[in-house]
Image (cartoon, rainbow, N blue to C red):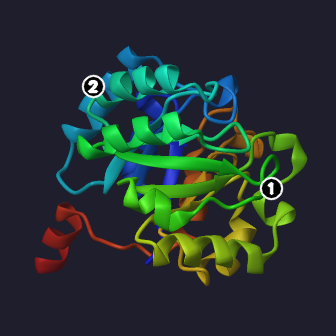
């Protein structure tokens, strides 16, 4: 079952997504790059806000660590700082053509400490898939396909459905969660649901005028949410059914 991930930059945006029953609240600053990071203070405030709400209102909270160079020490420190905020999933962008042995070793160490790490690969930069089984053996939680330069086109224009299917099936067969994102629009959803990815990620499609650096628009969120079947009901909804 495919879940919906929505990216937000602040508490007000998170509130809109929670009311729409978005499954995964993803924290990032869209004006700071493909995986722009939000300040740790603001991340903590959003985590506390989401977790203080109705139990089961969402499946989890993810956050990006920023568009960082692929240097093990830098990435490690960023992962540790983000983990301290209480987020459930940490997204790490792969901004080079390969993962060094030092970097893999560092990621495996963090994964061994029960940190859920998702590696984000970019369809408009590198199209050589990693060894999914190897990544799974290191304890990584999942992988995601995104786009680095939003001016280069959406994920569905850069890659064929067959290629996307290969990414999803390969990752899942290895025991990894598989996500798809990258300027996805409401019109992409029906076809992408057939791939049965673990989640589809959205930002621009949820914003005013479809501009990712703009603010979240409640009607746009509802449009996308209505196209992706709910995978769970909140406690409040269950109570309404019971009554």
Q: Residues within 10 Å of mark 1 (few under 14, many from 20)?
A: many
Q: Nearer the viewer, residue 32 or 214?
A: 32
Residue that carries the numbered disc 2 in the rendered image = 84
SS at circle 1: loop
Q: Nearer the viewer, residue 241 or 119?
A: 119
Which x, y percent locates residue 148? 75, 41
Q: Nearer the viewer, mark 2 or mark 1?
A: 2
Say which residue appears at 65% left-offset and 56% top-offset: 145
Q: Residue furthest front?
A: 101
Is residue 50 in sight in this rendering? yes
- Quick check: 226 left or right of 33? left
Instruction: State whether residue 85 is above or below residue 16.
Output: above
Q: Residue furthest bottom?
A: 194
Say which residue appears at 55% left-offset and 61% top-offset: 179
- Quick check: 25 left or right of 153? left
Instruction: State whether residue 152 is above or below residue 45.
Output: below
Q: Residues within 10 Å of mark 2 (few under 14, many from 20)?
A: few
- Quick check: 240 left or right of 16? left
Disc sitting over residue 142 in the figure? none
The reply to whether discs 2 and 1 touch (Cβ–Cβ < 8 Å) is no
Say which residue appears at 30% left-offset and 33% top-offset: 47
Q: Residue furthest right?
A: 152
Which x, y percent locates residue 70? 61, 30
Residue that carries the numbered disc 1 in the rendered image = 154
- Quick check: 43 left or right of 48? right
Where does the N terminus fall, quadrant-wise? bottom left
- Which circle's residue, 2 or 1, is located before the other in the chain? 2
SS at circle 2: loop
Instruction: State whether residue 226 is above or below residue 41.
Output: below
Is residue 199 in sight in this rendering? no
Say which residue appears at 18% left-offset and 72% top-offset: 238
Q: Nearer the viewer, residue 38 or 65?
A: 65
């Amino acid at each position: 079952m495919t879940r919906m991930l929505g990216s937000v930059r602040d508490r007000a945006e998170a509130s809109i997504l929670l009311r729409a029953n978005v499954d995964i609240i993803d924290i990032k600053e869209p004006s700071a790059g493909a995986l722009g990071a939000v300040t740790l203070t603001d991340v903590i405030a959003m985590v506390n806000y989401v977790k203080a709400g109705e139990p089961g209102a969402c499946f989890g909270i993810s956050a990006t660590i920023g568009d960082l160079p692929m240097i093990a020490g830098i990435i490690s420190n960023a992962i540790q700082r983000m983990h301290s905020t209480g987020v459930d999933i940490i997204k790490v962008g792969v901004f080079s053509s390969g993962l060094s042995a030092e970097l893999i070793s560092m990621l495996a160490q963090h994964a061994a400490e029960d940190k859920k790490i998702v590696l984000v690969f970019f369809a408009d930069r590198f199209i050589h898939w990693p060894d999914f089984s190897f990544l799974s053996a290191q304890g990584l939680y999942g992988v995601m396909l995104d786009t680095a330069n939003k001016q280069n086109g959406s994920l569905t224009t850069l890659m064929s459905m067959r290629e996307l299917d290969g990414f999803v099936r390969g990752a899942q067969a290895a025991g990894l969660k598989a996500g798809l994102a990258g300027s996805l629009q409401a019109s992409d959803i029906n076809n992408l649901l057939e791939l049965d990815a673990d989640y589809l990620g959205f930002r621009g499609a949820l914003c005013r005028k479809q501009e990712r650096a703009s603010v979240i628009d409640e009607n746009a969120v509802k449009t996308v949410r209505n196209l992706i079947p709910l995978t769970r009901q909140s406690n409040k909804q269950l109570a309404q059914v019971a009554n």
